[in-house]
Image (tube, rainbow, N blue to C red):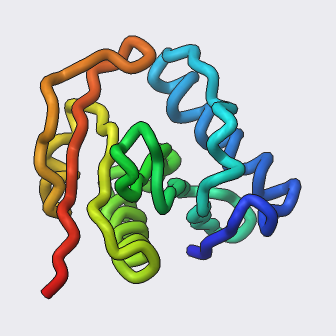
Amino acid sequence: MYWRSWQELSKQELYDLIQLRLAVFSVEQDCPYQDCDALDQKAIHLLAYEDTRLVGYLRVFESMEQSADNASIGRVCCCASQRGTGFGKLLMQEAIEYCDKNFQKTITISAQAYLRDFYHEFDFDVASTIYLEDGIEHIKMIREINND
């Protein structure tokens, strides 16, 4: 696993991350949506490869207006072969550690509602009622920064 800014992404890495996100969010979830949202340029990207195949991905932001200027984690996904192995937990743990080390602020996510318990394991608490995002039920969740 490694981190890349927008400027550091190679053309191949960009292709790989778009391909994985579309496979998971558009094809598997049967959800046509605009993936290229003009936010990738502002994000820090976590890429997890197995040999030459991207098997996991997410992006983080230091601050977003949509999240009340909190840090944010989004587009969390892994390929089907990695699901149920604990790999998604490794991705999230890496993202939280990165945010805590580099941003030192509360983290907000827009989680698919069925993953509430998964994110709760990382101390995210529900902060909204269920809402539809691209036709899929989501909830806002917040993880307060621990300044101990």
- 134 vs 132, left or right, is right
Q: Residue at x 74, y 65 (%)?
A: 52
Q: Is 24 rendered above or below residue 69?
A: above
Q: Residue at x 64, y 53 (%)?
A: 42
| Residue 109, x across and y down, in percent | 32, 46
Residue 110 placement: quadrant = top left
Q: Nearer the viewer, residue 82 or 93?
A: 93
Say whether residue 33 is visible: yes
Q: Residue at x 31, y 16 (%)?
A: 132
State which quarter of the image contains the N terminus: bottom right
Q: Nearer the viewer, residue 52 or 14?
A: 14
Q: Is 123 rendered above or below residue 136?
A: below
Residue 88 placement: quadrant = bottom left
- 94 vs 28, left or right, is left
Q: Residue furthest bottom?
A: 148
| Residue 128, x across and y down, in percent | 15, 31
Say whether residue 76 is visible: no
| Residue 68, x across and y down, in percent | 34, 45
Count the labels in the image. Answer: 0
- 22 vs 97, left or right, is right
- 91 vs 110, left or right, is right
State which quarter of the image contains the C terminus: bottom left
